[in-house]
Each structure stands twice: as structure tokens, then as C-alpha cells.
Image: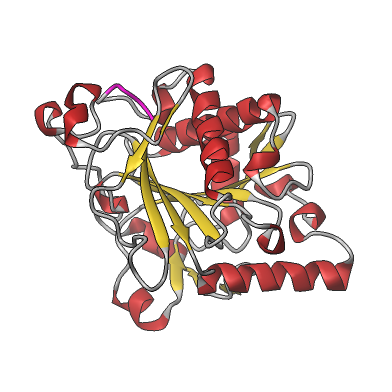
Amino acid sequence: MIKKNFLTGEYVIYSLDRANRPQSIKKNTLKTPIEICPFCIENEHMTSNPIYTSFNKEIRIIDNKYPIIDINREKYGIHYVLIDTKEHQKNIVDYTDEHMYYLIKSMKDILNILEKDEKLEYVQIFKNKGANAGASQSHSHWQILALSMLPNRQKYMLDTLKEYEKDNGRCYFCSMDYTDNLVCENNEFLAFCPDDSLYCYEINIIPKKHITNIKYLDDYMLNELGSILKKCLIKLNLVYNDLDYNISVQNGFRAKYEYHFFIQIIPRMGYLGGFEFSTGMFVNSVLPKDAAKRLRKI
């Protein structure tokens, strides 16, 4: 079965037999020694002074020592690292609800700070957990990239969502029936496996109300978002222990770029191969409804 992903325009082939391949799940092998970890509080001298520190002192945002873009290039940009814990061995599944609240609040706060720079058009907040997801340090952290241009993928998504709303009189996410694909929900958010998932066990988290930016969330909603994000990661870790993954915050930035925001969790089960790189198509070995059903039962 082949489907076209609505948001990106990319095609995915559902090939269930691929799940039986040997070594189809790659395990995380990234272990940075505490003594040389730049993100441990004892080694603060290895990094720049914090741009932002959370109220509970657990979370810091610093300049990325090795930025992929900077303010001195023709295309303007800012590259930060968000260190989301003082504890070297901890990950999101270990955090308290209060800690998760401050993590999401730190995203809201940095978005508000970056929006003051009129040169910036887009901000991408993302997390690489594990070597197979692109992480270079095992200490839990996120990255924040602010750009003076809108990436093509986000432009396609924005145009597609605007066209859908124009044709149907309603937001794409607000129109969907999530019953069969639901993973979990709380009062303000729901998590689901998209019907056109490009990745095995991919989960999207969306607000139940039509909210276009994390900056519009009040304290209660920040807490609810942190809670459901942690719950989804616990479920994934109970399916595949210590799984590497990426988290992508698909969030509107300036008013003209806003859409129903969502958080995408991408488990990294093996590597993309020659077919994917050659064609731009994806291969998924688990049907989204089956993935949702399994996750829902946990």
C-alpha cells in the first residue's frame, strides 16, 4: 500500500514484512562520560553563559558551540542548545510533571524572545535522542534554530493547510476523526499515529483547541502538554526499550506562518537506506492504526 503524506507531499510505502528483518531496531550506543560532558552543571566553564535559565534552575539555553548558521552569514540565523536537565543520566521519561512544565515553558519563553528579532521568519525546536537520531552528546538536550527564511518543507505544509482550510472552511487537524488512531489524550491535548505516517510508531501531539503557537498556552495547558509528551515517550519506551528518537515542534512563528501547531515524535528504528535517499519515498513496516492500537493498550 502506498500513501501520500498530506502535510509534506512525500510518499510512504507500507511494507509489513520489513518488520521481520534482523536488526531492524537500532539501539542507542551513545554514552558521553560525565567528566567531559559540556552540559553537566559541573562543567559550565565549557559553554557560554546561559541566555535563559528556568525558574526551577533545571533548564538552561546557551549558544551552540558549533552552529550550522550564524548572524554573520548572508542568510541570517541563530542556533541555541536547550539543556533540559542537570542530571547527566536522566531523560524525559524520568522527569517530574513540574519539570515537564518548565521544559515546555522554556520553549514558550524563547519563542517570545526570538520573535522580537524582526529578521527571523521561522524557528525550529527539535530534539535528537541517541546516536541513531543524530545526537552528539548523551546528556539530554534540545536544539533551537531560528532562520531568516521559511524552509521549503514548512512552506509546503503551510500552503497545504491554508488551501485545505480555504476549501473546507475548517482547519485540517480540527476536521480529523482520531478514534482509530488515538494513542492517548488529556483535557487539552491528544496524541495519535497519523494515517499517513512516514515513520514506524510516529506520534503527533496536537491541542484539542485550534491553537497556532505554543506562546498562546497558559500555565495549565503548558502542564498538560508536558504531561502528554512524557506519557507518549514512556509508551514508546515500553514497546522498544531505550529507543532513539527525534522530536520536532511544528509551531507557527509569525502570524502569517501560523497553523494548528503540533509536536511530532519520530522513533528511529533502523537507518534510512538507498531507496529512501534516491527517491524521497519512505518505507514504514507498521500500519498506523496497528501502532496506535498497541500504544493505546500500554
Residue lying at the far bottom of the rendered structure = 279
Q: Residue at x 57, y 59 (%)?
A: 118
Q: Residue at x 22, y 28 (%)?
A: 44
Q: Is residue 2 visible?
A: yes
Q: Residue at x 74, y 46 (%)?
A: 211
Q: Quadrant of residue 140?
A: top left
What colour scheme does the image use?
Answer: secondary structure
Q: Is residue 70 left or right of residue 210?
A: left
Q: Which corner quadrant holds the N terminus?
A: bottom right
Q: Residue at x 69, y 35 (%)?
A: 217
Nearer the observer, 76 or 260: 76
Q: Position of residue 171 (x, y in %)?
A: 80, 59
Q: Position of residue 264 (x, y in %)?
A: 53, 50
Give the residues in magenta.
Answer: 83-87
Nearer the observer, 152 or 79: 79
Reply yes or no: does residue 228 show up in magenta: no
Q: Is residue 218 above or below residue 4?
A: above
Q: Is residue 175 left or right of residue 145?
A: right
